[in-house]
Amino acid sequence: MKVLIFCDMEGVCGIQSWEHTGGSSPLYEEGRRLYTAEANAAGRGALAGGATSVVLQDGHGGAHSGGKPFMNWIPDQLEGGAHYVRGYRWARYVEPLERGECDAVGFLGAHSRAGSPDGVLCHTVNADGWHAVRVNGREVGESEILAAIAGAFGVPPICIAGDDAACSELRASVGQGLVVAPVKWGLGRYAARMLAPCDARQTIEAAFRSAVGDREAWPAPLVVPSPVSIEVDMASPDRAVPYAAYAGVVLRGPRTVAARGDNFWEAWSRLWQAS
């Protein structure tokens, strides 16, 4: 059984400020340690549940000031047994899906979509630049985008760990078969009631072990009905202009861009082209 785990940083226990997620603040180093430890817990759990292959991708775009994104884990603190993808752009790493080398996907460090009143560090894709993402007219968050990418390849989402709002958001889309592991509860965008990080790691490990080990309970893949339309409301018109140069992307207003496709991956690939 082969599992791919999409990882992010804002939903990690103990993180509730942007200073934890990038830049030159000492809090970023604290955030990196917390993030790395949760990645280890998810990997341990998936392997204990029976996975024969576990690949985790660092999908957080933060970095040291002047550094490259998607390289947040502390390499010499990562545990053996799993593979780790660093330096690869978020929502573009689909190699295991394309090769048929993925049976299920999971989510670690997940946060809720932009505008969630109880979502810690809530945003969708770009905290400053994107105000909303709609798929076939329904607003979605990042975990739903990733689940829909996996669904385009027939792969189900089975487990999510992060803040409570993110867990509830994805479960509402994919059903009760999704195993959830909330590790903090928002008291606003920059405040949270949380587990102790050591307890959060135990919760995450147990959740991934349970999810991987109970294949009969897995939810169905999240397949968006065709044709798929993705719309993004940008913060300002100037942010929308560059997208108009992408093949298959159109402007639907001064700050709204849209792409269509026969399935979600096709539509998303037009909108979120590699830079």
Image (cartoon, rainbow, N blue to C red):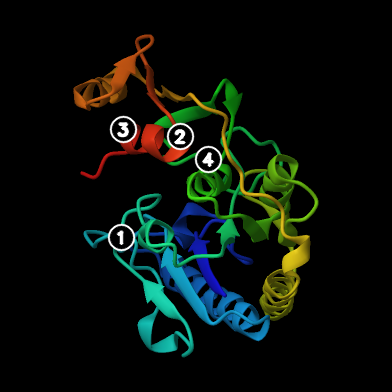
Real-space CA distance between mark 1 and mark 4, rounded to the nearest whole angstrom: 20 Å
Residue denoted by label 2: 263
Give the x, y percent position of residue 75. 37, 82
Which x, y percent locates residue 243?
A: 26, 26
Which residue is disc 3 drawn over? 270
Q: Give the quarter of the image for residue 21.
A: bottom left
Give whichever of 184, 218 is nearer the camera: 218
Helix, strand or loop status at disc 2: loop
Question: Pointer 4: what residue?
Answer: 123
Look at label 1 and name its amino acid: Tyr
| Above or below 240: residue 20 | below
Which is closer to the viewer, label 1 or label 2? 2
Look at label 2 and name its amino acid. Asn
**Chain-order first, disc 2 or disc 3:** 2
Residue 171 left/right relative to 142:
right
Circles 1 and 3: CB distance less than 8 Å? no
Residue 61: name its quadrant: bottom left
Identify residue type, mark 4: His
Image-quadrant location for residue 52: bottom right
Q: Nearer the viewer, residue 32 or 164?
A: 164
Q: Which of labels 2 and 3 is toward the front?
A: 2
**What's the distance in space between the residues labelled 1 and 2, CA to CA?**
23 Å
Closer to viewer: mark 4 or mark 3: 3
The image position of residue 155, as x and y in percent, is 55, 55
Give SS at disc 1. loop
Mark 1, mark 3: which one is toward the viewer?
3
Label 2 Cα crowd, 10 Å radius (few <14 / some 14-19 / many 20+)? many
Which comes sooner in the sequence, label 1 or label 3?
1
